[in-house]
Image: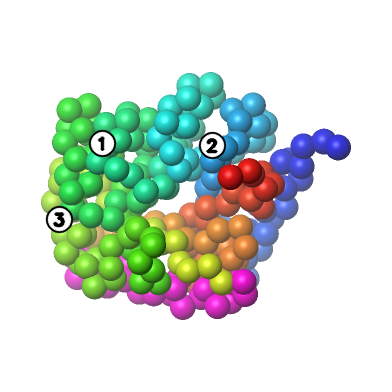
Amino acid sequence: MGDPLEPNYSRLCAEIREAAEKTGRNPDTVRLLAVSKKVSAERLRILWGLGHRLFGENRVQEARAKIPDLPTGGEWHFIGGLQTNKARDAVEWFDVVESVDRVELAAELHKRAEAAGKTLAVLLEINVGGEAAKSGAKPEEAQQLFQAVNAMSRLEVRGLMAIPPFREEPEEARPFFRRLREIRNQLEQASGAGLPELSMGMSHDFKVAIAEGATLVRIGTALFGPRAG
């Protein structure tokens, strides 16, 4: 049996477009972030051949080994929990860090970006479900975190990211997606800054996330199939 990657990709692109159009959105404002954790560079090259350029990795070490094996010109997002001692590598290998959830991490990324002479795009991760086991700033801390990070000249805050509590029924995740959008809107109104990106929604609930304003949907399993571990 052949690799299902190509038909999966075609189907997902069509479903993303349809979900956007259904809610009156321009489909071009929603991008598929291919979550390539534990996916070989060889399979990513198949995706590259289909024209895809946006990838998300959860682990710095895995990305360091994989990114050099792919053509240049892709856009790489770090989407996992990030320790401050990995900040230098994150700045070196990634275009966007989506998981900035504390000032300490932002300060380290800023320092490393300054040393590298680059500006790093970031998203602020918000723990919209209030889950103790998950990273992310508390919703009530979003304003303070945004103000601190936005003041760092080498970091460009592009928007927000969230990993809501898992729900078997995708529709039950809607309030969490809506909450992230509301927090984003509040930050924009309070600061006058533009925060265009909302990274939310995964394989089983991305259609609901798109209906609530997602601009980046992080899809792994539905694209690459189940992965061990």
Distance, label 3 to label 1, CA atoms, is 20 Å
**Which structural element holds mark 3?**
helix
174 falls in the magenta region: yes
Residue on which disc 1 sits:
85
Q: Quadrant of residue 36?
A: top right
Which range of residues does the magenta coloring cover? Answer: 168-192
Which mark is drawn over residue 53?
A: 2
How many marks are shown on the rendered structure?
A: 3
Quick one: label 2 or label 3, which is nearer the N terminus? Answer: 2
Q: In terms of depth relative to the viewer, which is nearer, 208 or 43?
A: 43
Q: In terms of depth relative to the viewer, which is nearer, 175 or 39?
A: 39
- On the question of residue 128 being in view, the answer is no
Amino acid type, mark 3: Ala
Q: Position of residue 11 (x, y in %)?
A: 72, 52
Q: Position of residue 80 (x, y in %)?
A: 41, 47
Residue on which disc 3 sits:
148
Distance, label 1 to label 2, CA atoms, is 28 Å
